[in-house]
């Protein structure tokens, strides 16, 4: 049995949280582990060790491979079903790797501005999780 697919995301970001709640991957890939990167854990540690900045993009972990930012969004869109309007739109936009690379910085900028407006810190500015 292969490892579950995991998505590392910022649980303090309303866009990231809604995205992982709405995307329909389970039908296509089976169980999906949603990991709030602010809580830390082995996959978060691995992503950091690989130099993946979780403030600059979510991470999809699949078959032992770490996909970050626009690449993660592209892969998620490719794996998603078209079962909802959200997934249809997400697939239309992000299944195109070039469009995904072009739009991801805009999404990241919106995330960063929203966190600032809500008075929330970036993950790198948070104290490490207790554990």
Image: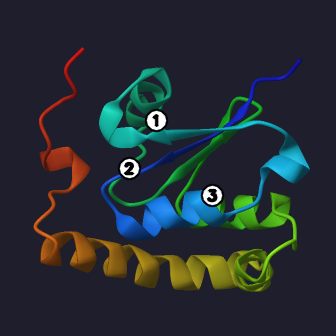
Crowding at dot 1, Cα within 10 Å, few <14 / some 14-19 / many 20+, comes out as many
User: Can you identify the residue that label 1 sits on?
Assistant: 47
How far separated are the C-alphas under marks 3 and 2? 12 Å
Q: Quadrant of the C terminus?
A: top left
Crowding at dot 3, Cα within 10 Å, few <14 / some 14-19 / many 20+, comes out as many
Tell whether label 1 touches label 2 (CB within 8 Å).
yes
> Element type at marker 2?
loop
| The disc label shown at residue 72, or none | 3
Crowding at dot 2, Cα within 10 Å, few <14 / some 14-19 / many 20+, comes out as many
Give the left or right position of residue 61, taking residue 42 as reference: right
User: Can you identify the residue that label 2 sits on?
Assistant: 54
Give the left or right position of residue 108, taking residue 69 as reference: left
> Element type at marker 3?
helix
In the image, 21 versus 56, the foreground residue is 21
In the image, 44 versus 84, the foreground residue is 84
Residue furthest top in the image: 131
Q: Is residue 98 above or below residue 66?
A: below
Spot occupied by residue 82 in the image (x, y as percentages of width and height): 87, 73
Spot occupied by residue 57 in the image (x, y as percentages of width and height): 44, 59
């Amino acid at each position: 049995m292969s490892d579950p697919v995991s998505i590392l995301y910022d649980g303090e970001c309303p866009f990231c949280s809604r995205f992982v709640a709405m995307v329909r991957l389970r039908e296509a890939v089976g169980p999906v582990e949603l990991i709030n990167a602010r809580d830390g854990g082995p996959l978060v540690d691995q992503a950091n060790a690989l130099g993946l900045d979780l403030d600059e993009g979510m991470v999809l972990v699949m078959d032992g491979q770490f996909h970050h930012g626009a690449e993660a969004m592209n892969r998620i869109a490719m794996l998603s079903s078209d079962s909802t309007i959200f997934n249809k739109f997400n697939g239309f936009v992000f299944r195109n790797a070039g469009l995904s690379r072009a739009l991801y910085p805009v999404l990241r900028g919106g995330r960063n501005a929203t966190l600032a407006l809500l008075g929330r810190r970036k993950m790198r500015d948070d104290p490490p999780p207790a554990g």
